[in-house]
Image: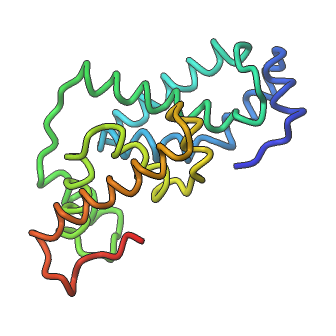
């Protein structure tokens, strides 16, 4: 989401109301990002809360207001990864199926789980880049900022990550059912 740089600058300078409004406007995106990592509503909420707390504590360190959203996403990803590292949890398939059915997902639950499992099996940099690009609609430039690497590297990571996903899913689905990721 694009924010007015004046509001972000005010938040950086200590305006709590400006920061509160900015965080409110980003809450759904941050929660979804946390959820894609931890796969549990309660844990995603905890990661979201840790992200907000970290943002409040360190917003004064943000040097370039135009990178506010990507800065927040980077905090969220770091908090989610730390959470996963510290809380090695098992997710049971029944819980995943029940959650998907409860959400009224019309797509095939098994297919969603296959894609999710294939994505989860990727090395972290590929998973992060693909999630930012295809789940959060980030541009290559925004992903480069979040991942702290050149845009060319992001393009390579996305290309290789898609290749790995296609390879993983090729064994699961016949060619005619394989999802087009391009």
Q: Quadrant of the C terminus?
A: bottom left
Q: Is residue 81 above or below residue 96?
A: above
Q: Is residue 68 left or right of residue 168?
A: right
Whole-percent x, y for residue 90 in the image? 13, 36
Q: Is residue 86 above or below residue 106?
A: above
Whole-percent x, y for residue 36 in the image? 36, 46
Residue in view at x 80 percent, y 23 percent: 11
Q: Quadrant of residue 18?
A: top right
Q: Quadrant of residue 25?
A: top right
Residue in view at x 21 percent, y 87 percent: 176
Q: How many marks?
A: 0
Whole-percent x, y for residue 46 in the image? 41, 28
Viewer-side residue, 102 vs 85: 85
Residue in view at x 61 percent, y 37 percent: 70
Q: Residue furthest right?
A: 6
Q: Is residue 110 left or right of residue 57?
A: left
Q: Is residue 3 above or below residue 114?
A: above
Viewer-side residue, 91 vs 144: 144
């Amino acid at each position: 989401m694009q924010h007015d740089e004046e509001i972000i600058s005010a938040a950086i300078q200590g305006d709590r109301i400006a920061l509160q409004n900015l965080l409110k406007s980003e809450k759904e995106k941050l929660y979804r990002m946390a959820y894609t990592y931890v796969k549990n509503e309660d844990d995603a909420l905890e990661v979201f809360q840790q992200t907000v707390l970290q943002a409040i504590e360190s917003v004064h360190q943000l040097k370039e207001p135009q990178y506010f959203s990507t800065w927040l996403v980077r905090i969220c990803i770091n908090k989610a990864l730390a959470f996963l590292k510290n809380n090695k949890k098992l997710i049971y398939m029944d819980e995943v199926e029940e959650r998907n059915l409860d959400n009224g997902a019309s797509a095939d639950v098994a297919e969603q789980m296959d894609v999710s499992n294939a994505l989860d099996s990727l090395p972290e940099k590929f998973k992060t880049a693909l999630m930012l690009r295809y789940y959060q609609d980030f541009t290559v430039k925004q992903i480069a900022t979040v991942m702290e690497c050149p845009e060319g590297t992001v393009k390579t990571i996305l290309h290789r990550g898609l290749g790995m996903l296609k390879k993983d899913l090729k064994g699961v689905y016949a060619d005619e059912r394989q999802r087009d990721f391009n």
